[in-house]
Image: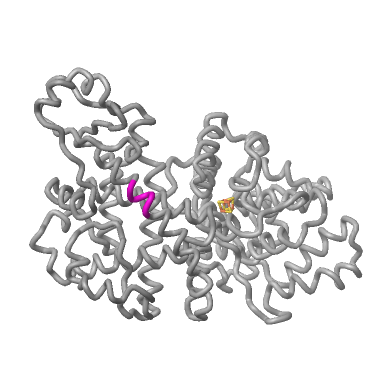
Amino acid sequence: MEFPGRRNKFAQNPQTELYGQPLHFYGQPPLENISLTEFETFAVERLKLLKTVENLGVSYVKLSDQYIKKLDIEFKNLNFPYRADADDRKSQSGPSEYEKRRKDHISHFILRLAYCQTEDLRRWFIQQEVDLFRYRFNDLHPKLKLEFLHKNNLQYDAITVEEKRMLQDKLVNSSYGVSGITVEDQDFYKVPFQDALDLVRTRKVYLKAGYVYVPHQDIVTIVLNDFRTRLSKALALTARSLPAVHSDERLQPLLNHLSNSYLGQDYSIQKNVGKISLEQIDPLSGKSFPLCMRQLHQALRDNHHLRHGGRMQYGLFLKGIGLSLEQALQFWRSEFTRGKVDADKFDKAYAYSVRHMFGKEGKRTDYTPYSCMKVILSNPPSQGDHHGCPFRHSDHELLKQKLQSYKVSPSGINQILELVKGMHYQLACQKYFELTHNVEDVNFSLSHPNQYFVESQKVLGGGKDIKREMDTSQRSQGNNNSAARNSAAIREKTVAANTNASQDSAEMTEDLDSYFHDA
Ligand code: SF4
């Protein structure tokens, strides 16, 4: 694999020099040959790192002790260069540090290719890369920080002692975290105000005649601003080269997979087929389905119909949790024929697409359930559609009402809406999980609706909870045949312990138990 272009320039910058610095602005693309396996591994591991950065960024104050500690661990686990190495100048020439820096460099450029494709992807990528950069810059030794500034033409002049004395009152009054005592001991840099818009906007610096006076500790804001601007321009340029990249048939599927990517199982495994019965779907939808699937299930029960986008998203999810082809056909047929579609029309118009989903028609592709990224980024719903991710695609007021109807507390709703506002849709979904499962901190990073389901079942005790709900709902069925379809009542029902479970139910529960705990 070869990264095209700019070979001559690179020839003047051998790799030893390129990786001599612990941190750079990624101005120079890598030009060496790498294998496709390395290409994919590097990209997936950087994506994992960026997902961790995103998760930590909303769970902890950025650069707080806990934030740094957790990010340190991830850096070490994934073999990216981290602060201990950056401080140790001697170890820089060692092969392992070189390899880490090489990986950091190459993986950044691969993700640029994958994440330059849409505005949403670009925004997400820039935010995580900027946070990552902040953490790494902050951990640099002061000497290395200065070296970094000089190498990148960010040579701002420190004001003289006389000028500092003259401006002392103004500097103390206008600068955040600077007192009369500390002003003597720290450097202030005179920076054109357009380079420090964040500091001006938040009124953290003294502004005079088009220049701001930035205390040493705030110089990171300027560097980040510069990095953000460079990266944003670089992504726009990269997007222009996409047609050429997409013509490479080895790269296109990899890049598409990365940008729609989630890191984990694809939930296409067959071992769980037949472990879920149709009667379990109603109670499970209230307890263990993520909001996107709960919404689809409800729409299907209410309207006895779903459009193609909804059928694909929900149908593949159900396949992933264990519905067999026969069960799926029965499920969709029984629901559709309660509406305007008769059995004959169902068999002619809809059964084909169900069989298609299971790889029994057309190209015979055994389709895998959609990941969150796919649901969030592709095929947005229009009027009358129910697919998509409610955290991404629902109007705020509608989302609020939905959460209220699912008994999420007002403070929980506010937390979720805040995350949605910051475009952290999967984190909003994780918060919904925490609130509806009464757990303080989910110990997984959500990337797939089927992962949500499996994690929910683990929290609820595998299949045990399902069994109890089943027994309760079956008793209700005895009293009222239509109760099984009264999904709202069943979903919100308090589950009573049932000590007289039948032998069949117990076996079914054991199977579910082992499936959910193996998964
Ligand atoms: Fe579904 Fe993922 Fe959105 Fe949650 S974040 S609602 S699982 S698409």
Question: Can you see residue 253?
Answer: no
Q: Quadrant of the N terminus?
A: bottom left
Residue at left offset 27%, top offset 54%: 73
How is the model colour-coded? one colour
Q: Which residues are magenta?
A: 226-230
Q: Position of residue 158 (x, y in %)?
A: 15, 36
183 vs 271, left or right, is left
Tell me where residue 449 sits by quadrant. bottom right
340 vs 469, left or right, is right
Q: Position of residue 251 (x, y in %)?
A: 47, 76
Q: Position of residue 492 (x, y in %)?
A: 67, 41
140 vs 256, left or right, is left
Chief secondary structure of the magenta portion = helix
19 vs 372, left or right, is left
Is 52 in front, or is 20?
20
Residue at left offset 65%, top offset 65%: 316
Residue at left offset 18%, top offset 67%: 17
Is 190 in front, or is 471?
190
Residue 229 inside the magenta-drawn segment: yes
Q: Position of residue 422 (x, y in %)?
A: 49, 41
Residue 65 inside the magenta-drawn segment: no
Question: Can you see residue 304?
Answer: yes
The image shows a total of numbered marks equal to 0
Is 156 in front, or is 15?
156
Give the residue at the far front of this rendering.
Answer: 209
Up/down of 145 relative to 412, above or below: below
